[in-house]
Amino acid sequence: MQETITRNADLRSILTEARRALQEEVHGHLRDGRTDRPKEVRDEIERSDAGLQGDIELALLQMKAKTLARIEQALVRLDAGTYGACSECDTEISERRLRALPFASRCQSCEGRREQEQGAARRVAQRRDSGALFSDVIRP
């Protein structure tokens, strides 16, 4: 019991620090984005590079925002007393996994299954989309 309390206190500290750091990054990026003025772009290649850089920055910002939301959810689970239990099978998530990924909501087994299912769904969608590319050319 005391071991779980100590573990949770340590992990709360990790989660709180990660939340603070991510909030600073996200808010700083948003603040900088408002003050940045578009640079004069001279040619098509520079416009393309600037657009690509903007897309990458947006994707990174979205990833940070999702991670921040997962941290917030983990802190809610900590307060509710459900932190460390797998949301799928209700078994205990290993301390090693929680230390590596303190906002984990699934045990390694359930997360692996979920990733396999998502991968299979993506492959099916890709096959369906690639078949549609030539559907007007190749007809049975």
Image (spheres, helix red, strand yellow):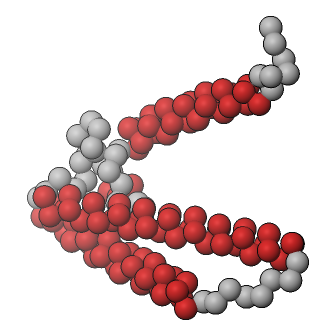
Asked whether residue 19 appears in the rendered view, the answer is yes
Quadrant containing the C terminus is top right
- Image quarter of residue 97: bottom left
* Rendered position, 37 above or below 74: below
For image coordinates 35% across by 44% down, the residue present is: 107
Between residue 44 and residue 56, name the one nearer to us.
44
On the image, the x and y values in percent for residue 88 come to 29, 38
Q: Is residue 15 left or right of residue 60?
A: left
Q: Is residue 77 left or right of residue 136?
A: left
Q: Is residue 24 left or right of residue 53?
A: left
For image coordinates 27% across by 36% down, the residue present is: 89
**Could you tell me how many numbered marks the image carries?**
0
* Rendered position, 88 above or below 82: above
Quadrant containing the N terminus is bottom left
Between residue 100 and residue 52, name the one nearer to us.
52
For image coordinates 52% across by 86% down, the residue present is: 34
- Image quarter of residue 60: bottom right
Asked whether residue 25 appears in the rendered view, the answer is no
Between residue 64 and residue 53, name the one nearer to us.
53
Considering every residue shown, the one lying at the far top of the view is 140
On the image, the x and y values in percent for residue 112 come to 46, 39
Q: Is residue 83 left or right of residue 57?
A: left
For image coordinates 54% across by 31% down, the residue present is: 121
On the image, the x and y values in percent for residue 5 come to 15, 65
Between residue 86 and residue 124, name the one nearer to us.
124
On the image, the x and y values in percent for residue 126 come to 66, 33
